[in-house]
Structures are given as C-alpha cells and as structure tokens.
Image (spheres, rainbow, N blue to C red):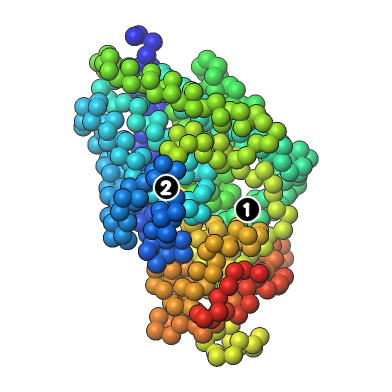
C-alpha cells in the first residue's frame, strides 16, 4: 500500500524515538533509586500488600507473580539498560520485528511498575509515557519509512493532551476565564524551579498574555495539527515553544518534554529521505489492527473530554493504552507547605530543640533557591505538596513516613536532602506543621537573602513517637 508510509518524517521519527528512550531511562532510574522507601517490602505502601488485595486483571504486573526488593531493583536497572540501548540506537541494528520487540520491552517493564506503584505513580505523565511508548512500538526502524497511521495517532494523542488540558481549565477555576490564574500559579505550583520566582514577579499584564496564549495553544492550535503542511508544522512548533516556557517556569517531571517529543513528531524536518524497503505485509496488518483497536478504545476518553463532568489524568484500561489528560483545573491562591521536625529530647515541648528535615525539591529552608529537577521525578516531594492541600491525600502514607524518620530508615533518608540527626541517633519525637509560603519581594530578598517568606498556620501532626503514630489531623 503506497499510502501506508511517509518517508519525509524519518528524521522526526529518529528524534522522537531517541528522546522517548531518554525519558524511559529517566523514569526507570527514578524507580530504581526511590522504590525501597515508597513501595518496597518495608516501604510506606508495600507492593506485596497491594498485590494481595488487587487482582492481576485490574493491575497487570510481573510483580503479581513474584516480588522482592532485589527482584524489583533488577527489573528497574534492566529497564535502564534497555532504555540506554535504545538511546544509542540499538533498534536500528535489528530487523524490523526485532526492533518492535525491543521497543515493547520498556513498555511492558514500566507498565509492571506503574500498575503496582499506587499513589506514588498516580500522575498523568505515567499514563502518557505508557500510551506514547505503546505507539512507539509500531513506528518501525530504518528498514521502513514511518507508518502514516502511527504518526496520526501520535498527533491525536498530542491533540487530546493539549485540548483536554485546555477544556479542564475553562470548565474549572474561574481565574482561567478571567486570565488571572498566573498571578498565583508560578508561586503555588507543586515544585517551583530556579526561575519560578522571576516568572511570578512579572507584571500582571504579562501574566494576562501568558494565560491567553495558553488558551490559544491548548484550545485552538491543536486543531491545526490535522491541516496540511506547513500549517501543521507551525502549530507543532508553537506547542514546542509553549512547552519549553513551562520547562523554564517549573518542575513537571517529564510531562513537558514528552509533549515536546510528540510535537516534534509532527514536524517534517528538511532532509533527504534514505532509501527504505516497502513495508512488509505482516507489518501493515499489525499496524492496521492496532490502530483500529485503539480507535475503538479511544471512544471513552473522547466522551470524557467532551463531558461537562470531565475528569483529568484517568486511565480507561489496565494497560494504559488510552487515557485522559489535564492539569490545574483549579489553581491555589496560597502556598502551604508541610514542615517535618524532630527532637532528641524525651519530652516534646515547644522549646525542645526541634530540628527540620530538608527535602530535595519542595520548599523548606527559606534561603534555599528552588532547584531544577525535571525531567527527573521526586515522588515524595510531589506528594508532600498534595498533603499540604489536604491531609486526606496523605492518610495512606504519612504515618509511615514519620515512622521511618523515627527509625532513621536509610532508604527513606536517601529521599531527603538532609536529615538533622546522625545515623546512629534517631529522633525521639517527630512532628509536622503547616506553614504558608510566599516568594520574597525584591526588597525582602535584598534585605534577608531569603527566596521565601513563611508564616506558621497550624499543627499538621502532633509530636509522635514510634509507639504512638496516627493519621494526620
């Protein structure tokens, strides 16, 4: 079938595949380095406890068959190795069927992790990586030109990602309709970056332009993806610029970078297409069958996207093949942070010498400038932001976190930037307090050297010891 492939997009495929492999590598690396404290055998939400109550059909994963921390570590590090091989172009050294199988490996491996990751893996970019990764299996390698149907499905995924995010904003917080959300968002977003304070301090008219440009990019430009070249190329390029703006202004794991890669798959880079063989019949049949199946499955996320009761970041099947996306349907006007402290004294009083734990990414020390971590994902730091929004988000794991801090658990302490207690002398008590944080004004920054100003709000968790932990207040 002459229409089946599009040779002009071979550079787009190359850039997309290498970038996707790099994001797989980041995802597996984060799993390998963080899993023990989060979902390990002694973690806050252990995998064995989860697989004991959730059947395989609801959450397909190799860890239903066997789990140990050593096995999980080997699984995650193997995922890193396979991803690194794909970054290096190993799929180009294999026949077409072998390349497809190689791309299937990280998808299966990461699916097994996400499906037992529970709260720690409940973010929309997990499903986005899996949905994108599944499509990448059928993009082929240097033997054949990129299939038109798979390129179209990548555009359709980018459309749903952007348009769904735009709709959830317009249906949600009124500040998006009034163009005022960015007066607050740069300061209250989950994990500010090194330039977030600069973005927050931009004049309010600039914030209005930012917000309006966001609406245009998410609600109008996605339709141009399905127009002929060069309009579709220009639309995708505009999306790339918008996503890079978001990269500069905050830390959203690999969400923005994956959106960039999806947009780059739309752009036909000017380069002479290499000679390729005609697509084999079996490959055409497989791609047609997969595309038809995804179109059928995709009806549910489309209905959700068009519904007035639209929900964001939801998967509609246990394999995460089709999903809904969206972010910040509501924007916080005030930033709250949960601050955890410990004391070595036997009686927990206000003057008991409380010492503060420092997290890697979330605000803590007011003098510490926010760091850039994306595309790496600090899962505990993100969930601490949700905990500050409502204790209900922390009910399943926060008590376990405090218990492990009381034990000076080394796996948990490795998730932190700094523990105020030596390894052989854990605290006697820990407590958690809620503070309001805001960026320092220029005058405050010059006078105090602090990036943040904070004010005590209330107790989040009373002083707790190993024999008396309980759920958050």
Q: Residue furthest top?
A: 2
- Identify the residue shown where x is 56% and y is 31%: 301
Q: Earlier in the sequence, mark 1 or mark 2?
A: 2
Q: CA distance from mark 1 to mark 2?
A: 35 Å
Q: 322 left or right of 283? A: right
- Identify the residue shown where x is 27% and y is 25%: 142
- Circle 2 packing at 10 Å, graded few (<14), some (14-19), many (20+), is few
Residue 249: x and y in percent read 59, 49
* Foreground residue among 363 and 288: 288
Whether tag 1 and tag 2 are in contact, CB under 8 A, the answer is no
Q: Residue furthest bottom?
A: 346
State which quarter of the image contains the C terminus.
Answer: bottom right
State which quarter of the image contains the N terminus.
Answer: top left
Q: 302 left or right of 178? A: left
- Identify the residue shown where x is 39% and y is 72%: 410
Q: Which residue is mark 2?
A: 55
- Identify the residue shown where x is 51% and y is 17%: 229
Q: Which residue is mark 1?
A: 189
Say above or below: 120 vs 1: below
Q: Secondary structure at mark 1?
A: loop
Q: Quadrant of residue 395?
A: bottom right
Q: 27 left or right of 182? A: left
Q: Quadrant of residue 165?
A: top right
- Circle 1 packing at 10 Å, graded few (<14), some (14-19), many (20+), is many
* Foreground tag (1 vs 2): 2
Q: Which mark is residue 397?
A: none
Determine if residue 120 is in view: yes
Q: Secondary structure at mark 2?
A: loop
Residue 27: x and y in percent read 40, 49
Residue 233: x and y in percent read 51, 23
């Amino acid at each position: 079938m002459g229409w089946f492939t599009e040779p002009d997009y071979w550079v787009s495929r190359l850039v997309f595949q290498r970038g996707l492999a790099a994001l797989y590598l980041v995802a597996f690396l984060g799993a390998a380095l963080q899993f023990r404290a989060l979902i390990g055998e002694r973690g806050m939400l252990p995998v064995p406890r989860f697989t004991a109550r959730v059947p395989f059909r609801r959450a397909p994963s190799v860890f239903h068959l066997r789990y140990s921390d050593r096995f999980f570590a080997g699984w995650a590090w193997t995922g890193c190795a396979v991803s690194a091989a794909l970054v290096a172009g190993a799929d180009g050294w294999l026949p077409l069927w072998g390349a497809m199988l190689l791309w299937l490996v990280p998808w299966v491996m990461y699916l097994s992790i996400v499906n037992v990751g529970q709260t720690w893996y409940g973010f929309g970019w997990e499903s986005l990586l899996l949905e994108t990764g599944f499509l990448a299996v059928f993009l082929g390698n240097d033997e054949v030109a990129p299939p038109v149907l798979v390129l179209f499905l990548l555009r359709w995924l980018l459309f749903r990602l952007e348009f769904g995010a735009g709709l959830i904003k317009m249906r949600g917080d009124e500040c998006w309709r009034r163009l005022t959300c960015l007066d607050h968002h740069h300061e209250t977003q989950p994990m500010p970056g090194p330039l977030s304070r600069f973005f927050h301090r931009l004049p309010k008219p600039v914030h209005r332009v930012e917000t309006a440009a966001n609406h245009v990019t998410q609600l109008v430009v996605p339709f141009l993806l399905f127009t002929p070249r060069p309009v579709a190329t220009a639309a995708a390029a505009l999306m790339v610029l918008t996503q890079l703006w978001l990269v500069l202004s905050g830390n959203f794991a690999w969400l923005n970078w994956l959106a960039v890669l999806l947009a780059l798959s739309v752009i036909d880079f000017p380069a002479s297409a290499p000679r390729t063989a005609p697509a084999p019949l079996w490959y055409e049949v497989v791609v047609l069958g997969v595309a038809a199946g995804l179109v059928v499955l995709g009806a549910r996320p489309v209905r959700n996207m068009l519904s007035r009761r639209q929900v964001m970041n939801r998967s509609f099947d246990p394999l995460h093949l089709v999903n809904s996306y969206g972010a910040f349907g509501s924007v916080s006007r005030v930033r709250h942070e949960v601050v955890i402290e410990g004391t070595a004294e036997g009686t927990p009083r206000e003057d008991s010498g409380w010492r503060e734990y420092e997290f890697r990414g979330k605000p803590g020390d007011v003098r510490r400038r926010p760091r850039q971590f994306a595309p790496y994902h600090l899962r505990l730091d993100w969930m601490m932001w949700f905990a500050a929004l409502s204790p209900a988000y922390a009910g399943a794991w926060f008590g376990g976190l405090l218990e492990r801090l009381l034990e000076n658990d080394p796996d948990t302490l490795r998730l932190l930037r700094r523990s105020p207690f030596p390894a052989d002398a854990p605290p006697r008590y820990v407590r958690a307090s809620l503070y309001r944080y805001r960026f320092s004004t220029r005058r405050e920054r010059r006078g105090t050297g602090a990036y943040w100003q904070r004010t005590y709000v209330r107790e989040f968790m009373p002083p707790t010891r190993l024999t008396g932990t309980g759920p958050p207040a």
